[in-house]
Image (spheres, helix red, strand yellow):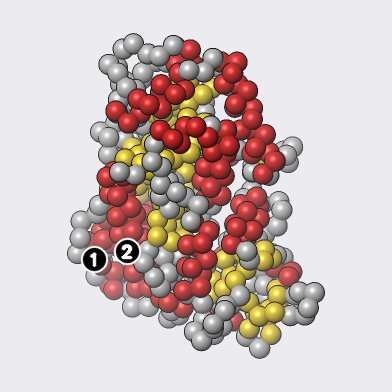
């Protein structure tokens, strides 16, 4: 293959995974040709200046994140690569339909689970698997949220395998994060490389805050002409605090902490300089355990005493509903295709990654015997923490992990080591483009209205060579994702 000069001159195509930009013979997809040509005109020094400009743009916007295990406690700028990922509209349409189907069924599952439990009685899903999930919320039993919606906001993680197909890696419906980076990436791209957009028809992403606001309004308590919505943050030490500020600002709503709210006569109020103001919808960015010290953790200083009583009285809506986490438990995730057939009588549009549940004796034996060929994950962690990639692990790590699985098999699932697709990514230390593994988080909204999917998700990049973990907390970065219009 004859690669362009300059920034691509040392690019090496890795035949073990699908490269979305280059093949061993040529540019892999025709719609990337104009993009590669555009970036090929830059000399390394010139491109370094543009890259530095994009960093400064992020810094001035306050686009940072905290890493929980960072002993220095410093905020970091989220690494951003200016070479966008392109997805054709026809391909995106299939992704969008699959995401909507999946989240429709997760809402049906949650409604059934907290009421009649038909899916358990019919033995489609083991009752003990639900009962042993730390995210199952007994306080939600026999309660129906406003609009019958449990999961209003979902981040669906997809990977593209070497067969070219997209697979769902996991669902994120507890407190999904990252949408602010989707919007900030697009803004930064337009500032750093404005001329690039003239070569493509790129579908917009900046309608997300408005759509989120409409979703919140749609599930407000009945009888309100102008409901008051707020975003509840745990505070500035949270890793996604920037996102909380960004979204509240974009929607024009108040960002509050638990200490700003109180409950009186089963209604929630926030303190203002003009006196108490009733709150009708709370977009909460804190976990269930910290929502209400009267019901959950008694030592919580982040939540609001009496909040659950107000919620179950129908006087305030919580987005997402408490107890939704049981549906993104990674062991229960493996049953979503069964749920689609059970509730919708349809075949899944998007397939799961094959998953072994260590709580199942047969699966556990297979995992123990093939640990070096698998990726093992805790069912209750996020951010890439606690993951073992078998073929990268030392003998000691494999031994230690076997012991942890034996001690608590319910806590772990395993999956084959999937060959996440590769994408051209600028590596600053080398001043050139190299292939790096990527995934895709797609954001969708669900209320008493037509479901909405943001047309351009968060493409996360594993910046270290051959690394498969893309999370920012594990050294990953991101790209702008362009869904191409016709």
Q: CA distance from mark 1 to mark 2?
A: 7 Å
Q: Position of residue 211 (x, y in %)?
A: 47, 62
Q: Position of residue 183 (x, y in %)?
A: 53, 47
Q: How many marks?
A: 2
Residue underneath mark 2 = 105
Can the viewer see residue 421 in this picture? yes
Can the viewer see residue 134 in this picture? no
**Which residue is at a point 40% across and 14% down the rendered structure image?**
4
**Which residue is at a point 51% across and 86% down the rendered structure image?**
223
**Which residue is at a point 46% across and 78% down the rendered structure image?**
146
Q: Position of residue 390 (x, y in %)?
A: 41, 31
Relative vertical location of residue 134 with respect to residue 195 in this rendering, above or below: below
Quick one: quadrant of the C terminus?
A: top left
Q: Position of residue 80 (x, y in %)?
A: 56, 34
Quadrant position of residue 309 = bottom right
Q: Residues within 10 Å of mark 1 (few under 14, many from 20)?
A: some
Secondary element under disc 1, as helix, strand or loop, is: helix
Secondary element under disc 2, as helix, strand or loop, is: helix
Quadrant position of residue 191 = top right
Work out whether residue 377 or residue 68 is closer to the camera in this orientation and state it: 68
Give me the disc on residue 344: 1
Work out whether residue 381 or residue 161 is closer to the camera in this orientation and state it: 161
Quick one: quadrant of the N terminus?
A: top left
**Which residue is at a point 29% across and 28% down the rendered structure image?**
30
Work out whether residue 252 or residue 14 is closer to the camera in this orientation and state it: 252
Instruction: Specify which label sits upstream in the sequence, 1 or 2.
Output: 2
Residue most extreme to the right: 273
Left or right: residue 328 compared with residue 209 = left
Relative vertical location of residue 327 with respect to residue 429 in this rendering, above or below: below
Quadrant position of residue 421 = top left
């Amino acid at each position: 293959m004859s690669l362009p000069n300059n920034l691509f001159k040392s690019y090496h195509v890795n035949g073990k995974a699908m490269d979305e930009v280059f093949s061993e013979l040529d540019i892999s997809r025709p719609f990337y040709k104009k993009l590669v040509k555009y970036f090929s005109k830059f000399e390394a020094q010139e491109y370094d200046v543009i890259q530095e400009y994009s960093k400064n743009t992020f810094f001035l916007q306050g686009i940072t994140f905290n890493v929980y295990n960072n002993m220095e406690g410093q905020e970091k700028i989220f690494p951003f690569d200016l070479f966008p990922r392109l997805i054709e509209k026809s391909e995106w349409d299939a992704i969008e339909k699959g995401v909507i189907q999946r989240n429709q069924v997760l809402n049906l599952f949650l409604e059934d689970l907290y009421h009649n439990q038909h899916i358990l009685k019919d033995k489609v899903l083991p009752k003990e698997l639900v009962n042993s999930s730390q995210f199952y919320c007994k306080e939600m039993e026999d309660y129906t949220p406003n609009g019958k919606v449990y999961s209003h906001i979902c981040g669906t993680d997809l990977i593209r395998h070497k067969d070219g197909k997209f697979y769902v890696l996991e669902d994120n419906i507890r407190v999904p994060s990252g949408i602010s980076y989707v919007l900030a990436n697009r803004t930064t791209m337009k500032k750093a490389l404005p001329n690039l957009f003239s070569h493509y028809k790129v579908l917009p992403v900046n309608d997300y805050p408005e759509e989120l606001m409409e979703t919140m309004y749609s599930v407000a308590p009945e009888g309100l002409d102008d409901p008051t919505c707020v975003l509840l943050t745990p505070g500035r030490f949270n890793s996604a605090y920037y996102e909380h500020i960004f979204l509240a600002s974009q929607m024009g709503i108040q960002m509050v902490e638990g200490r700003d709210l109180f409950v009186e006569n089963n209604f929630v109020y926030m303190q203002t300089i003009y006196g108490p103001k009733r709150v009708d919808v709370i977009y909460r960015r804190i976990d269930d355990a910290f929502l209400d010290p009267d019901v959950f953790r008694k030592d919580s200083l982040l939540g609001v005493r009496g909040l659950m009583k107000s919620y179950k009285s129908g006087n305030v809506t919580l987005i997402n509903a408490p107890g939704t986490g049981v549906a993104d438990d990674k062991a229960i995730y493996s049953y979503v295709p069964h749920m689609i057939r059970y509730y919708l009588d349809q075949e899944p549009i998007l397939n799961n990654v094959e998953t072994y549940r260590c709580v199942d004796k047969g699966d556990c034996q297979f995992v123990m015997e093939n640990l070096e060929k698998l990726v093992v994950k805790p069912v209750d962690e996020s951010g890439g923490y606690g993951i073992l990639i078998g073929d990268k692990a030392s003998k000691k790590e494999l031994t230690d992990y076997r012991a942890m699985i034996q001690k608590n098999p319910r806590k772990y699932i395993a999956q084959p080591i999937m060959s996440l697709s590769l994408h051209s990514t600028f590596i600053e230390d080398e001043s050139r483009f190299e292939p790096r593994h990527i995934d895709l988080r797609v954001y969708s909204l669900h209320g008493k209205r037509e479901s909405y999917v943001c047309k351009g998700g968060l493409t996360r990049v594993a910046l270290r060579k051959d690394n498969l973990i893309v999370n920012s907390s594990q050294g990953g970065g991101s790209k702008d994702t362009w869904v191409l219009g016709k």
